[in-house]
Image: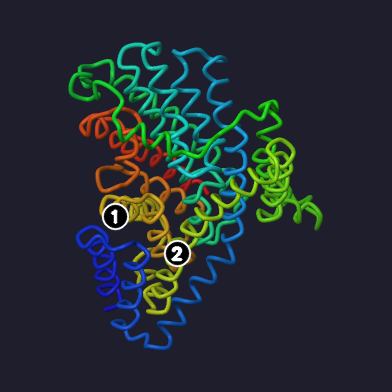
Amino acid sequence: MEVLHTAIAIVLAIGLIIVVKVDPVISLVIASLYLGLASGVGFADTVEAITTGFGSIMADVGLLIGFGVAIGALLHSLGAFRKLVHLLLRAVGPRRLPYALTAALSTIFPSIYVDVQVVLAAPLARTSAPHVGRNGLALLSGAIGTGIFAGYVFVVPGLAAVSIASLLDIKLGEYLLYGTLFGPLTAILTTAIFAVLLRTRYWNPATDEEPEASEEAQVEEEAAPAEADSGLPLGVLLLPILVPLVLIAFGAVADVAGFSTPFIAFLGNAAVALFIGLLGAYTLSRWKSGRETTDEALSGGFKTTGEILLITGIGGSLGEVITATGMDQTLASLFSADAGAPVVITILLAWFIAALLHLAIGSVSVAAIAAAGIIGPVVGSTGVAPIAIGLAIASGAMFALQVNSNFFWMFKSLLNLTTQGALKTMTVVTSIASLVSLPPVIVLALVL
């Protein structure tokens, strides 16, 4: 019965979010309460599971998300990301810009929130489109969409990436090593496939592009946080991002290779590494922008952090309630990895659950967190490497971002697309990216 009640709880959460338009946090709490009470966990134990799950995920990712968002907010205020985008344009030229842009978005930009990423990248796409070639706006829009979300789900410190790693108990350094490979490769390959598609009659500027920038797009850009040019070299500005990633990766390699020491482990700890990055970003900002601007940037970052942490924590609560129902033992009896086929089935199931949740809910992060919460309790009993299951969830959570996503409408307005044009770019490239990344994940699962 616990499987049935879990399915009902998921449908309940999805229905509240989509049909009744209830906030995801409230919807997930209601679903968690229903699941615990209907499955016989009991009043007190249900509440305990919700609070324990919330506290556990906060202990794992709370500081990481907070530090990561704060670093991004400070570097954004220093003009680091806009400088990077324009450097790419000068360095590679308009023709190669889509590939350079999607690579940058999927590796460097995950430190800032997706809404800010599209605000930064959209003006460059619109102004560069005529120089990129035929259907330049469509290609650049697709490159932006796939780059943002490939980075978001695969690359640390992207919110979805950090949350999946925590909920499945994957070492962040391990996720970083694999995700840094999967993210940009998925983004670049997807952009290449989309470029081939655009060589056909697939794109029609008359019906897929707005004749001129919409008033909503102008309002979005005017409302974006001010970004000044600090005058610092780009290499210096990116150090608060690059240094933590190097420390985390080095710590993971040292652990695997057997030469780790307590000091290396300390510096490679994700929270310590990101705090070092935060100190660097804060120092640069105070030096170049002053205390007032720095405090304003941090305040905006912390506000965003609060919203992110709440939904992330509630996702952990749902996973803990699922564990309390005993469903982990039920599912463990259904999935075994004694042969190659069950491994593939397990990966496909993880991908499918995440994809289905995203299609229903419209949020990549909520889909990833909910899927990881559902699958997390049974990961250890499947015999499949947790990193492979985590990457499968990441892959599925990208699938077909469309009209039930707030980001979709922001993307449409800022890139000057019609609704049809946004579907033919954002929805299509996230679907391609999800499908392109799945086969390598299956191969990885069979190898590990």
**Quarter of the view holding residue 206:** top left
Question: What residue is shown with label 2?
Answer: 376
Q: Note whether residue 290 is visible.
A: yes
**Helix, strand, or loop for circle 1?**
helix
| 256 with respect to 54 (left or right) | right
Badge 2 density bin: few <14, some 14–19, many ≥20, Cα 10 Å: many
- As drawn, 310 above or below 245: below
- CB under 8 Å between callouts 1 and 2? no
| 121 with respect to 274 (left or right) | left
Q: On residue 361, which mark appears? A: 1
Q: Note whether residue 253 is visible.
A: no
**Helix, strand, or loop for circle 2?**
helix
In this view of the protein, which residue sits in the foreground, 202 or 88? 88
Residue visible at 70% across and 46% down in the picture: 291
- As drawn, 65 above or below 214: below
- As drawn, 431 above or below 123: below
Badge 1 density bin: few <14, some 14–19, many ≥20, Cα 10 Å: many
Distance from Cα at disc 1 to Cα at disc 2: 20 Å
Residue 148 point in image, percent of width and height: 44, 37
Residue 272 point in image, percent of width and height: 71, 54
Residue visible at 32% across and 62% down in the picture: 23
Amino acid tagged 1 = Ile
Please tell me whether mark 1 or mark 2 is closer to you in this view. 1
